[in-house]
Image (cartoon, rainbow, N blue to C red):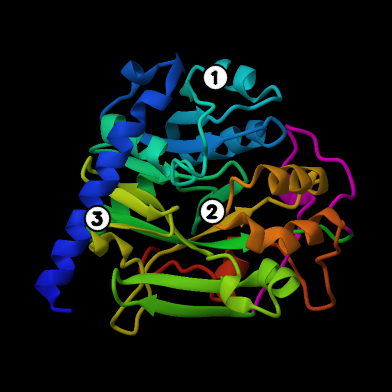
């Protein structure tokens, strides 16, 4: 395929994604719209949630401390106190839908519409409620410092590796309150066994490995979850994520890695999926079938989670901080000093 033909195909695909998002806007009902409070330089955070009341207090606190000034959330039919909790946040705008998560490209159609309307011109984080972003110097340098550095480097996107965090014992053990830092409980991770490829079509990375690949997909590693994400983007209304936040269009935004032998500044998403309650939640999600394109293929994955596995092994590494992640090659300062 010639470069011109590929560019045309990708441009057409992007236009279709934007059209899908525009059509799906009717599925969203605004419960609290505070977007008039958004200032021109604000960093925004977009997320789609369902039954996340146990995670959201710390999630919001963590990302507020990083410098997020406004959250734009879609509640997909929560049956717990998620919606009430979010309605009580003055720096958060909330929409609700009971439509199919899978039919909305796993929520991305809804978020793309909100990004089109409210994100253009802003640096935008797009996260799941079980993801905590960290990056070099994150405790002392807020997101505007990072985005300022990226802009000085001519970059409009920032990559991060998803690291599955897990407890010392079985995944159902212990108690973690909504205001607790989940990383105090999920203190372990896999430091190695990551495989990296570059997908030439859209120039995005494809990284697999970590605890989920090791524990659940050892016999079929190509089905293991994709771990590379591009969660932070200087948004334009013509941008669109293609596959969750693993890749987006236009393809130049996927080049969050160095091509000259050096390193670009990157971060990590601490993945807090394996909190107590995961076994019951896995049984529910298997029944709903909303999280995979072919949910039947992942029945064994859910069954394994429901069986309350122990992910910790003698090769597990205890989390210390971002400098440890950099030393292990899982994130990089690049030239940011």
Could you say which quadrant of the image residue 33 lies in?
A: top left
Q: Judging from the image, what secondary structure is the residue with disc 2 in? A: strand
Measured in 3D between alpha carbons, the distance from the residue under mark 2 to the one under mark 1, in whole angstroms, is 23 Å
Q: Residue at x 51, y 47 (%)?
A: 140
Q: CA distance from mark 1 to mark 3?
A: 36 Å
Q: Position of residue 195 (x, y in %)?
A: 54, 80
The residue carrying mark 2 is 134
Q: Quadrant of the N terminus?
A: bottom left
Secondary element under disc 3, as helix, strand or loop, is helix
Crowding near the residue tagged with mark 1, few <14, some 14–19, many ≥20 C-alpha atoms within 10 Å? some
- Provide the residue designation for mark 3: 13
Q: Nearer the viewer, mark 2 or mark 1?
A: 1
Q: Earlier in the sequence, mark 2 or mark 1?
A: 1
Work out whether residue 156 or residue 225 is closer to the camera in this orientation and state it. Answer: 225
> Can residue 41 be seen by looking at this rendering?
no
Say if the magenta span includes residue 183: yes
Residue at 33 percent across and 23 percent down: it is 38
Mark 2, mark 3: which one is toward the viewer? 3
User: Which is nearer the N-term, disc 2 or disc 3?
Assistant: 3
Q: Which residues are magenta?
A: 170-192
* Mark 3 surroundings: few (<14), some (14-19) or many (≥20) residues within 10 A: some
Is residue 195 visible in the rendered structure shown here? Answer: yes
Task: Specify the quadrant of the image occupied by residue 116.
Answer: top left
Residue that sits furthest to the left in the current view: 4
Q: Is residue 262 magenta?
A: no
Whether 106 is drawn above or below 208: the answer is above
Residue 212: image quadrant is: bottom right
Please tell me whether residue 4 is drawn above or below residue 281 in the rendered image: below
Labels 2 and 3 touching (C-beta < 8 A) = no
Q: Which residue is mark 1?
A: 89
């Amino acid at each position: 395929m010639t470069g011109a033909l590929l560019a045309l195909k990708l441009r057409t695909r992007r236009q279709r994604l934007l059209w899908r998002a525009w059509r799906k806007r009717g599925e969203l009902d605004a419960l609290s719209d505070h977007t008039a409070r958004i200032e021109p330089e604000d960093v925004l955070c977009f997320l789609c949630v369902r039954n996340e009341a146990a995670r959201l207090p710390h999630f919001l606190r963590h990302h507020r401390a990083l410098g997020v000034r406004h959250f734009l959330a879609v509640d997909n039919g929560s049956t717990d106190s998620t919606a009430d909790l979010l309605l009580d946040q003055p720096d958060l705008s909330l929409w609700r839908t009971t439509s199919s998560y899978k039919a909305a490209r796993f929520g991305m159609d809804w978020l793309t519409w909100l990004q089109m309307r409210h994100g253009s011109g802003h640096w935008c984080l797009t996260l799941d409620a079980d993801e905590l972003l960290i990056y070099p110097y994150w405790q002392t340098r807020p997101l505007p410092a990072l985005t300022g550095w990226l802009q000085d480097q001519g970059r409009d996107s920032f990559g991060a590796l998803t690291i599955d965090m897990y407890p010392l014992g079985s995944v159902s053990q212990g108690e973690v309150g909504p205001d607790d830092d989940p990383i105090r409980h999920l203190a372990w991770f896999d430091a190695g066994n990551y495989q990296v490829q570059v997908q030439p079509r859209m120039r995005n990375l494809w990284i697999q490995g970590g605890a989920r690949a090791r524990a659940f997909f050892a016999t079929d590693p190509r089905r293991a979850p994709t771990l590379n994400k591009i969660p932070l983007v200087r948004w334009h209304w013509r941008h669109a994520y293609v596959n969750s936040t693993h890749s987006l269009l236009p393809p130049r935004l996927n080049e969050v890695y160095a091509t000259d032998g050096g390193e670009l500044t990157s971060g990590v998403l601490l993945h807090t999926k394996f909190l107590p309650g995961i076994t019951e939640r896995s049984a529910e999600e298997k029944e709903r079938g909303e999280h995979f394109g072919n949910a039947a293929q992942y029945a064994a994955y859910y069954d394994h989670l429901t069986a309350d596995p122990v992910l910790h092994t003698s090769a597990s590494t205890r989390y210390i901080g971002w400098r440890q992640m950099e030393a292990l090659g899982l994130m990089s300062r690049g030239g940011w000093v």
